[in-house]
Image (tube, rainbow, N blue to C red):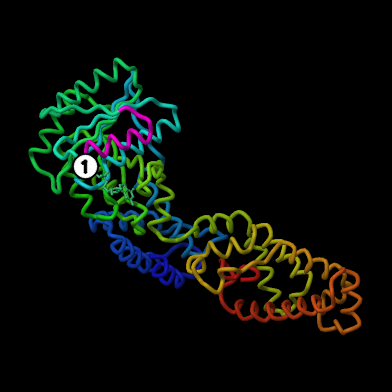
């Protein structure tokens, strides 16, 4: 998505308010991008409508260009649509808190039972009991037993054809043993059918779960929404666990499932291991769907640290060809304020994976050297680099404690970057593309 969106947004270079044309152009690309991420088309449509309403006529902030401003709005809306804040599990007033896992076959229910137990042990020093409620395949019970052994957690199972009864007995056991959590594993099917729903409803009637979590496989994309709707119709779901996100780069399912069911995503599964469970953060998922790397972090940094007026002043100097070593130092300071340059470059979409930039490093030490060299110049030399003849260069090298070759290199770099920046200032000086050194 990032590439496509970047291209679309690069064209938005006007100033002042965001125009309808700006938004129409951007939203066409955003729509395609979301569909490519396998977001449900109805969800996409609503989303675009929302973005248009939000963005139109909005004042473009001084430190951003309209493209960046639209990205910011898109990101905020995505975050909002996915619930804004991380949601926690419901807690019962008296122990045990009961969690029931439901979902289609193979989505990761049994694994998630184990992950959740592990999570609760780690975070709350909990003492959970697991109930084996998938009785149709002997292997399913063994799978849960093995997980229980790995975590040193008791697993309740029974040779009984009535799952509701098993669950009831399991709960009695938990009360006796004073377990603070009970996590119920259930059977799944390849598709939703009535027999499965009846069974799950009967379990619900005996267990009264505080949390009924639907386990959804992120890799199934928008197909997940139909499943979620189906389960939500028959059961009082309280939240969603989105599994296999480690295998899904698009993240579209998160947006669709949340938008269609209105249910909060509480956890995400990030791998097969029992510690691969994370609580869900809408803002992080929004960035992932946008595929922007840490573009937003970068925009925030730019807003905080980069003074647009300062940039304009520099641009002026470029145009008038009066950019000198004093300005060079000022720019170095600006860059340093933003953080290590190699990290900043990696945050720019498209740059992160650029092999040419993979090992780029401009260490603070080198910037310190450059500064030392400039400080060893006279005021006249700083203002007019052309007067730096070999004898002056030798004096400066001695003064700043670096070899002459380094002085030469730095003067050459200065001239090159000045040339490059002069070319760039023929365009728009606002925005990240014109940051010093980029
Ligand atoms: P169930 O039929 O719903 O109980 O599904 P299982 O818990 O047996 O999981 C089915 C398969 O998906 C197993 O091979 C799991 O290891 C795998 N799995 C579950 N969750 C994740 C996840 O978050 N990431 C990955 N990569 N695999 C997962
Ligand atoms: Mg299972």
Q: Give the x, y percent position of residue 19.
A: 41, 65
* Residue sitting at x 42%, y 30%: 121
Q: Is residue 9 visible?
A: yes
- Work out whether 268 lies above or below 419: above
Q: Residue furthest top?
A: 176
Which image quadrant: the C terminus?
bottom right
Q: What is the quadrant of residue 75 in the picture?
A: bottom left
> Callout 1: few (<14), some (14-19), or many (20+) C-alpha neighbours within 10 Å?
many
- Work out whether 393 lies above or below 326: below
CB of mark 1 near ligand 1 (< 8 Å): yes
Q: Which residue is mark 1?
A: 103
Circle 1: element type: loop
* Residue sitting at x 35%, y 63%: 30
Q: The magenta stretch spans which residues?
A: 140-154
Which image quadrant: the N terminus?
bottom left
| Closer to us: 216 or 172 | 172
Magenta portion: prevailing SS class: helix
């Amino acid at each position: 998505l990032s590439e496509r969106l970047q291209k679309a947004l690069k064209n938005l270079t006007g100033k002042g308010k965001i125009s309808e044309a700006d938004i129409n152009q951007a939203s066409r690309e955003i729509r395609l991008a979301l569909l490519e991420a396998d977001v449900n088309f109805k969800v996409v449509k609503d989303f675009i409508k929302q973005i248009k309403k939000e963005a139109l006529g909005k004042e473009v902030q001084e430190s951003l260009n309209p493209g960046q401003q639209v990205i910011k709005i898109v990101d905020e809306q995505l975050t909002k649509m996915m619930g804004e804040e991380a949601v926690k599990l419901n807690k019962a007033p008296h122990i045990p808190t009961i969690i029931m896992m439901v979902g289609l076959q193979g989505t990761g229910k049994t694994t998630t039972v184990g992950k959740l137990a592990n999570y609760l042990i780690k975070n709350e020093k909990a003492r959970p009991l697991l109930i084996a409620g998938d009785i149709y395949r002997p292997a399913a019970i063994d799978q849960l037993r093995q997980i229980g052994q790995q975590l040193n957690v008791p697993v309740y199972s029974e040779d009984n054809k009535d799952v509701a009864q098993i669950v009831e007995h399991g709960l009695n056991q938990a009360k006796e043993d004073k377990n603070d959590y009970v996590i119920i594993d259930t059977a799944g099917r390849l598709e939703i059918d009535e027999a499965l729903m009846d069974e799950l409803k009967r379990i619900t009637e005996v267990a009264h779960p505080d949390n009924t979590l639907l386990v959804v496989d992120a890799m199934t994309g928008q197909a997940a929404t139909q499943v979620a709707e189906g389960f939500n119709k028959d059961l009082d779901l309280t939240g969603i666990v989105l599994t296999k996100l480690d295998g899904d780069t698009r993240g579209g399912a998160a947006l669709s499932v949340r938008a269609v069911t209105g249910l909060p995503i509480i956890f995400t599964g990030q791998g097969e291991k029992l510690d691969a469970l994370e609580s869900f953060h809408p803002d992080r998922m929004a960035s992932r769907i946008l595929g922007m790397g840490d573009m937003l972090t970068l925009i925030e940094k730019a807003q905080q640290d980069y003074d647009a007026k300062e940039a304009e002043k520099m641009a002026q100097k470029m145009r008038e060809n009066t950019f000198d070593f004093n300005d060079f130092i000022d720019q170095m300071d600006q860059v340093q304020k933003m953080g290590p340059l190699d990290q900043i470059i990696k945050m720019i979409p498209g740059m992160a994976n650029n092999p040419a930039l993979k090992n780029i490093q401009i260490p603070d030490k080198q910037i310190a050297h450059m500064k030392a060299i400039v400080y060893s110049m006279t005021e006249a030399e700083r203002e007019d680099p052309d007067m730096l003849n070999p004898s002056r260069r030798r004096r400066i090298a001695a003064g700043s404690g670096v070899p002459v070759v380094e002085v030469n290199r730095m003067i050459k770099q200065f001239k090159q970057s000045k040339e490059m920046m002069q070319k760039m200032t023929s365009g728009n000086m606002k925005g990240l593309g014109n940051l010093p050194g980029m």
